[in-house]
Amino acid sequence: MTAIQKPTRYRRIPTETYAMQFDGDNFDSITAWVGPQRLKRIPSGTVCLWVDANKGWLAIDKGEWILQDRAGFYPCKDKVFAGTYSRISITPAVPEQTIVISVDPATSVSDVVAAIQAGSIHAAPMLAAW
C-alpha cells in the first residue's frame, strides 16, 4: 500500500511583470504591445490572445489583464490580478544636492547652522557638479 502524500507549501517568488487591462476599446494598443500575430478579433467580435504556454488561442473578456513574463503573454482575470499584483511606482532618483553659503569668515559654523534652522538664511540648493 502506498502512503498518502500531503501537499507541500510554496511561496511565489517575487517577480515583476508587464500588464495591460483590456477595456474593450484598447485593442489597437494591446496589439501594438503583444504583436498582431498574438491578438485577433474573430467574426463573433471576441478578442483572442495567443498563449505560447498553451500553444493555443484564449478568449479575452473585457476587464481581463494581459500579462507578459519570461514565458510570454497570458491572460489573467481582474479579481485574480487585483489579489496578486500591485503597481510598481517608478520614482526618479533624487540627485545629491550641495548647498553653497557665503558667510563672513569670522562667523562660526554653529552660528550659520542656527541661522539656517531659524530660517533667517535661505539657501538655494545647487546640483552637485563635482
Image (spheres, rainbow, N blue to C red):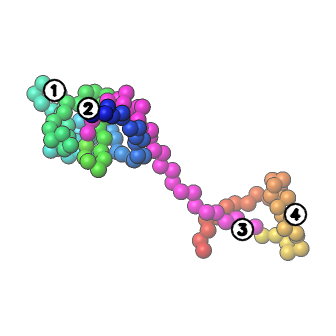
Q: Which mark is residue 100?
A: 3
Cα separation, mark 4 vs mark 2, equals 86 Å
The residue pinned by badge 1 equals: 45
Q: Which mark is residue 126?
A: none
User: Would residue 90 be counted in the magenta stretch?
Assistant: yes
**Vertical order, 83 against 116 (above or below):** above
The residue pinned by badge 2 equals: 1
* Residue at position x 36%, y 35% in the image: 7
Cα separation, mark 1 vs mark 4, equals 74 Å
Mark nearest the camera among 2 and 3 is: 2
* Amino acid type indicated by mark 4: Asp
Q: Nearer the viewer, residue 30 or 61?
A: 61
Left or right: where does residue 31 sit relative to residue 69?
A: left
**What element does badge 3 sit on?**
loop
Pointers 2 and 3 in contact (C-beta within 8 Å): no
Q: Residues within 10 Å of mark 1 (few under 14, many from 20)?
A: few
Pointers 1 and 4 in contact (C-beta within 8 Å): no
Q: Residues within 10 Å of mark 2 (few under 14, many from 20)?
A: few
* Amino acid type indicated by mark 1: Gly
Q: Residue furthest front?
A: 1
Cα separation, mark 1 vs mark 3, equals 65 Å
Mark nearest the camera among 1 and 2 is: 2
Looking at the image, tell me whether mark 2 or mark 3 is earlier in sequence order: 2
**What element does badge 2 sit on?**
loop
Magenta-colored span = 74-101
User: Would residue 56 be counted in the magenta stretch?
Assistant: no
The residue pinned by badge 4 equals: 111
Looking at the image, tell me whether mark 1 or mark 3 is earlier in sequence order: 1
Left or right: where does residue 73 sit relative to residue 109?
A: left
**What element does badge 1 sit on?**
loop
